[in-house]
Amino acid sequence: MVRIAPSLLACRFAELGSEVRAVDRAGAEWIHVDVMDGHFVPNITIGPLIAEAVRGVTERTVDVHLMIADPDRYVADFARAGADVITVHAEAAGHLHRTLGLIRGLGAKAGVALNPATPLSAVDEVVDRIDLLLIMSVNPGFGGQAFIPEAVDKVARARSLIESRRPGEVALQVDGGVDAETAPALVAAGATVLVAGSAVFGHPGGAAAGVQAIRSAVAGTSWSGARH
Ligand code: DX5
Ligand code: ZN
């Protein structure tokens, strides 16, 4: 089953509560919260207070994507804020194995994100300690960037890795430039969670229409390696 995770980065922040409720009502399973610190990535966005505010208006999975240096310093704050999933970048965590244990120890699901230039082998030694693998299909830092097509093959290889080591246990997420055009190939390659910012909140018909457009685009598509 494919889950859609609207990225709040593209929402109208002054209307945060109603934006979250709109995608919740539209059936988006996850709410993606992008945290940027001005160090790991050039941009600065939001922190645990806003994650907690999001938690307060939805029962959906609150999915926190930490694009921050030294994530160990903040994972407890985001767990306390009510995050269900906390994802850190392999490039930012000096001791990734420990960070993942820390996240799970706080009762959250642990994710690892890989930048476009980071090989899949960066997660090889920690596959047993993750609940989610995030393949970035843009260089993190900003919404609205063009999709990097090489991500499709990386997703396919990530799916093979998961199938061989932890079948059915690791969500495979893609983030960056995901829309109704790019989504089907990602799902066919084995993605299970699609993050979309601009394509949802920038949809001319509104956020609910944005969720629906992606949903319709992937309806009938499934992982091409699936055993039937
Ligand atoms: C990028 C963020 C993404 C971003 C996606 O650094 O991690 O979640 O909001 O935005 P779109 O879908 O517009 O590429
Ligand atoms: Zn993100």
Image (tube, grey):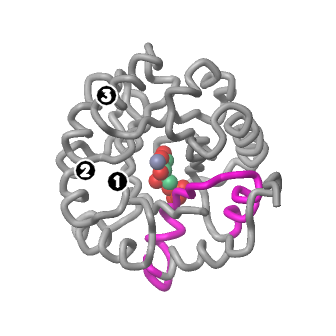
Residue 70 visible within the image: yes
Residue furthest to the bottom: 205
Magenta region: which residues? 181-208
Q: Which quarter shows the C terminus?
A: bottom right
Q: Amino acid at mark 1?
A: Val
Mark 1 vs mark 2: in front? 1
Q: Earlier in the sequence, mark 2 or mark 3?
A: 2
* Pointer 3 residue: 105
Residue furthest to the top: 95
Q: Amino acid at mark 2?
A: Ala
Q: Residues within 10 Å of mark 2 (few under 14, many from 20)?
A: many
Report the residue at 35% width, 30% height from top: 103
Mark 2 vs mark 3: in front? 3
Q: Is residue 153 magenta?
A: no
Residue furthest to the front: 228
Label 3, label 1: how far apart the Cα atoms are: 17 Å
* Pointer 1 residue: 62
Q: How many dots with numbers?
A: 3
Q: Nearer the viewer, residue 2 or 115?
A: 2
Q: Residues within 10 Å of mark 1 (few under 14, many from 20)?
A: many
* Pointer 2 residue: 51
Mark 3 vs mark 1: in front? 3
Residue 144 visible within the image: no
Report the residue at 23% width, 69% height from top: 17
Q: Earlier in the sequence, mark 3 or mark 1?
A: 1
- The disc label shown at residue 143, or none: none
